[in-house]
């Protein structure tokens, strides 16, 4: 049986999770809308760093 390799990229999942949980964490801690936006941006950046440094090159 031939094993088919998944060619779809799921990199966007790391960005969305970082964005959501960064904003959620900032909203719970500070309660302000401005801090929520900043937390979402920082979460997005940390998601990108995680994807490009830790997970890069790892096979499923």
Image: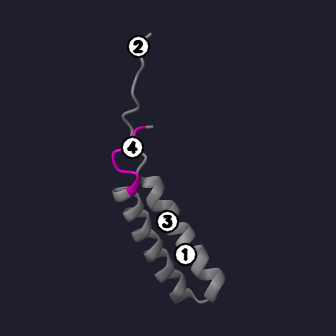
Residue positioned 49% across, 81% down in the render: 37
Q: Which mark is residue 11?
A: none
Q: Which mark is residue 2?
A: 2
Which element is circle 3 on?
helix
| CB within 8 Å, label 1 to label 2 | no
Query: Which label's residue is closer to the chain start, 3 or 1?
Result: 3
Query: Which label's residue is closer to the chain start, 1 or 2?
Result: 2
* Nearest to viewer (mark 1 / mark 2): 2
Query: Can you identify the residue that label 3 sits on?
Result: 18
Query: Can you identify the residue that label 1 sits on?
Result: 23
Say which quadrant the N terminus sits in: top left
Say which quadrant the C terminus sits in: top left
- C-alpha gap between disc 1 and disc 4: 27 Å
Which element is circle 1 on?
helix
- C-alpha gap between disc 2 and disc 3: 36 Å
| CB within 8 Å, label 4 to label 2 | no
Q: Residues within 10 Å of mark 3 (few under 14, many from 20)?
A: many
Q: Residues within 10 Å of mark 4 (few under 14, many from 20)?
A: few
Which element is circle 2 on?
loop
| In magenta segment, residue 21 | no
Q: Nearer the viewer, residue 58 or 45?
A: 58
| Secondary structure mostly taken by the magenta-highlighted segment of the chain | loop
Query: Can you identify the residue that label 4 sits on?
Result: 58
Give percent across and percent down for residue 38: 47, 82
Magenta residue span: 54-59
- C-alpha gap between disc 3 and disc 4: 19 Å
Tell which residue pokes out farthest to the top in this image.
1
* Nearest to viewer (mark 3 / mark 4): 4
């Amino acid at each position: 049986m031939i094993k088919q390799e998944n060619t779809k990229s799921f990199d966007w999942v790391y960005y969305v999770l970082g964005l959501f949980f960064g904003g959620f964490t900032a909203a719970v801690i500070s309660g302000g809308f401005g801090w929520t936006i900043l937390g979402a941006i920082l979460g997005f950046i940390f998601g990108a760093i995680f994807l490009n440094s830790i997970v890069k090159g790892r096979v499923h």
